[in-house]
Amino acid sequence: MGETSEIVSQRIEKLEKLKQEGKKIYQCDFSPQERLVEIREKYGGLESGAATGFMARVAGRVMAFREHGKAIFAEITDGSDTLQLYVNFKKVGAEQFAEFQDIDVGDWLGVEGEVFKTRRGELSIDVQMFILLSKALRPLPEKYHGLRDKETRYRQRYVDLIVNPEVREVFLVRNRVIRAIREFLEARGFLEVETPMLHAIPGGATARPFRTHHNALDIDLYLRIAPELYLKRLIVGGFDKIYELNRNFRNEGMSTRHNPEFTMLELYQAFANYRDLMDLTQELLGYVVEQVKGERRIVYRGQEIDFSGDWERISMIEAIQKYAHIQIHLDLDGEVLRKIASEHKVVPEEGASKGETINQIFEQTVASQLIAPTFILDYPKDISPLARTHAQDERLTERFELFIGGEEIANAFSELIDPIEQRRRFEEQLEARGGTEDRLIDEDFLRALEYGMPPTGGEGIGIDRLIMVLTDSPSIRDVIMFPHLRPEGN
């Protein structure tokens, strides 16, 4: 820390000296004409020692700097690529050469010069003119050790992006994934919509919300935990295929798989059920993977995952029997279920229902084994208050969750469209959770259902977890630009 402070002080002194000499330090009137990657693509095949005659006008951050007699070699990057600068004393003159000697790693430069290849085969720019565009007062981490501390990387993502090029690639993948999702859905007639992020009543999921206060209206509002109930209102209103790439907020624990704010894709299709959505999801994610990776196979945590072909579809009960070798069924008494759970080191929460106990058994004994894309179907009704009752078994719902690489990626229902049944389920849920004030019933949503909602399939896909799988990232914090952390010093 002391060494960094000393370097900062030295650079501030250098900055003040330049200002006293009448130099502009933070420029805004230099326009580069080429990206570095374009220069490399065009001239990368040049023979060693050859010149092009092409005068490039580029800008970039200095990443390395070394003097060799009357010559200076520097590396600059503009985010697209890195290129070498060659500064010759005879060509630029004594004044500009001396000014270049004062350049620090981290500074931004505007440069004009001829593109050539050195005798050692390094594509370079023979600098004719340069201008200091922005002075870096803080030093970048040392090149070969870089920025490795996870906490510092997340907290100072801007430095992480500068010195760890592989991090930039993660977020380029994220951008391509979202673009591919939009392309796929819009080609199939889905309309992108926006719904409120401030809700009068937290709804659409059972997570704990963040609360705020609107001064003008003098009412409490909640950051949305899911856009589901508003999107269903739009289905009632006549939009038959809609989606939203949305930011959700949940005031709960943090882990390698959870962040207080996260990105979801939610889509709704009228006249579709959960089996239709399984087909759609398989096509969608297969398309996305191929667009982003160039094929439908990836490696996640050392295991190959194939997104082609048909994915396994298996009920939750059958999955527990197949993967955990635990023989349970819905007719078992709640206490018997708890005993079976305990025998397999699963401890259900106090007062857990039968469905909640079965779900905990599944999550703790099966989920991590589902590496290949797998649809888990037919969830108990008491943990699925917004899903339609299963056609063959009234204790279950028409719901699936998709698991890839041991991670839950998607959750979907044949939507419950019966307003009377929906009210009853809301009331049961409210009573089971103690009727807390944050669990009010959304009367306007129920009123919308009373106007008649067509049969509908609805789904949410976790974008952050999907990006984790596609970039082989161990933590959700690796795929969110600015993840939430404790304040510095805590």
Image (cartoon, helix red, strand yellow):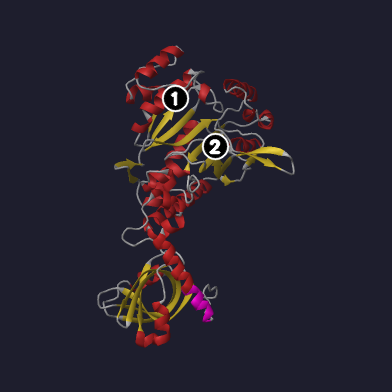
x and y percentages locating residue 458 in the rendered image: 54, 35
* Above-or-below relation of 195 to 368: below
Res 251 label: 2
Whether the residues at callouts 2 and 1 have beta carbons within 8 Å, the answer is no
Query: Mark 1 is on which residue type?
Result: Asn
The dot on residue 87 is none
Task: Specify whether residue 331 is in view.
Answer: no
CA gap, disc 2 to disc 1? 22 Å
Residue name at image x 57 percent, y 37 percent: 225
Three-letter amino acid code of the residue under disc 2: Asn
Q: Splitting the image into 4 quarters, where does residue 105 fall?
A: bottom left
The nearer-to-camera label among 2 and 1 is 2
- Mark 2 falls on what kind of element? loop
Q: Nearer the viewer, residue 336 or 377?
A: 336
For the record, the magenta segment spans 14-21
Q: From what the image shows, is residue 244 above or below residue 34?
A: above
Instruction: Please name the residue that numbered disc 1 is placed on.
Output: 359
**Badge 2: few (under 14), some or many (20 or more) residues near its Cα, within 10 Å?**
some
- x, y percentage for residue 92? 40, 85
